[in-house]
Image (cartoon, rainbow, N blue to C red):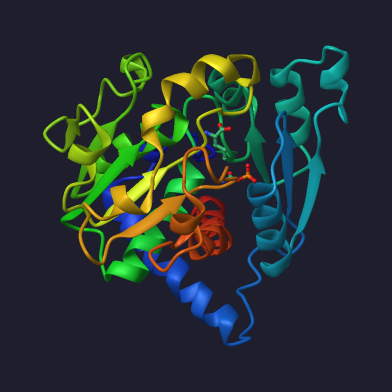
Amino acid sequence: MARHFLNLSDLQAREIRSLIERAIELKSMWHQNLACPQIMQNKTVALVFEKSSTRTRISFETAAYQLGGNAIFLAPGDTQMKRGESAADTARVLSSMVDLIVTRTGIHDTAETYAKFSTVPVVNGLSDAYHPCQLLADLQTIQEVKGGMDGCSVAWVGDGNNMCVTWAIAASLLDIELRISTPPGYAPNPSLIKDCDFSRIQVCSNPIEAVQGVDVVVTDTWLSMGQEDEKTEKLAAFESMQVTSSLMGNAAEDAIFLHCLPAYRGLEVQAEVIDGPQSAVWLEAENRLHAQKALIELLLAA
Ligand code: CP
Ligand code: NVA
């Protein structure tokens, strides 16, 4: 039976910790020009994406090549799904030929359908509900910059979106304290975080309260993919949620700023924060490659 990674909670806490250690090791090998373990020789990953991507696509394709394998990217409209072939039939066919499937779906249920009908591991490369691959890279970044994740405090300032939900799951699995500040009406969907450990999650009434003394401040776009029609109302609702240098001043002196990217300067984050000395976003983006190589190793070995 194939092992899937649709949600961060598909891994146990000890597996996340060892995956991150392995990602750091693979990164160090790569930076020293040492050969990567060729665990994907004669193996192929198919990326089936319904939505745009820069980092997720490039990091998985590059990971496959570095591990000695091949990657096939199927853009929206490239496949017979455009003409009505189901995710179930697509998953059956793809998994008879490739060794790993990475999906980027509008509706999370579609990723679940791929997993149900695939005989090879399916990885959720973002759905409307979760973005677990991004969290692996974020946790790796915290491990590298802070020297560890345990006991770390994180403030989420912004939309209660797929990233916020995945942070809540990360806090529940690991020893992380998460404080969430969203505008009224934009809290994370309760059904997606119902199994979370709320002793580690605090909902704050404003961003200043959320970031007070924290080690990490995180935000994301106010307009996730597919929400383009909500632009006017969301920009108005999120007006006071920008991560500014003044807001960062309430966090710990050595706090870092994370953002999964793409970022919109002047909206969710001030340019001087994302381009400033506390920003770890470029490290975070590069870590997508290393964390996913470690993930591929884990899933293909299962
Ligand atoms: N952070 C992230 O998933 O980026 P892409 O949308 O570019 O893949
Ligand atoms: N919340 C964003 C993340 C993009 C990587 C979205 O879903 O569009």
Q: Is residue 265 visible?
A: yes
- Residue found at the very far left of the displayed protein: 199
- Residue 207 in the image: state x and y as whole percent: 27, 36
Question: Number of labelled discs?
Answer: 0
Q: Is residue 66 above or below residue 208?
A: below
Q: Is residue 207 above or below residue 218?
A: above
Task: Please state if 190 lies on the left or on the right of 140 as rendered.
Answer: left
Task: Please state if 234 lies on the left or on the right of 255 as rendered.
Answer: right
Q: Is residue 137 above or below residue 123?
A: below
Q: Residue at x 53, y 24 (%)?
A: 128
- Residue found at the very far front of the displayed protein: 246
Q: Residue at x 70, y 62 (%)?
A: 62
Quarter of the figure with residue 142: bottom left
- Residue 212 in the image: state x and y as whole percent: 17, 47
Quarter of the figure with residue 255: bottom left
Along the viewing direction, whichever of 255 and 33 lies nearer the viewer: 255
Task: Please state if 253 lies on the left or on the right of 241 as rendered.
Answer: left
Ligand 2 visible in quadrant: top right
- Residue 263 in the image: state x and y as whole percent: 56, 45
- Residue 164 in the image: state x and y as whole percent: 38, 34
Q: Residue at x 78, y 29 (%)?
A: 93
Q: Is residue 95 visible?
A: no
Task: Please state if 34 lies on the left or on the right of 197 as rendered.
Answer: right
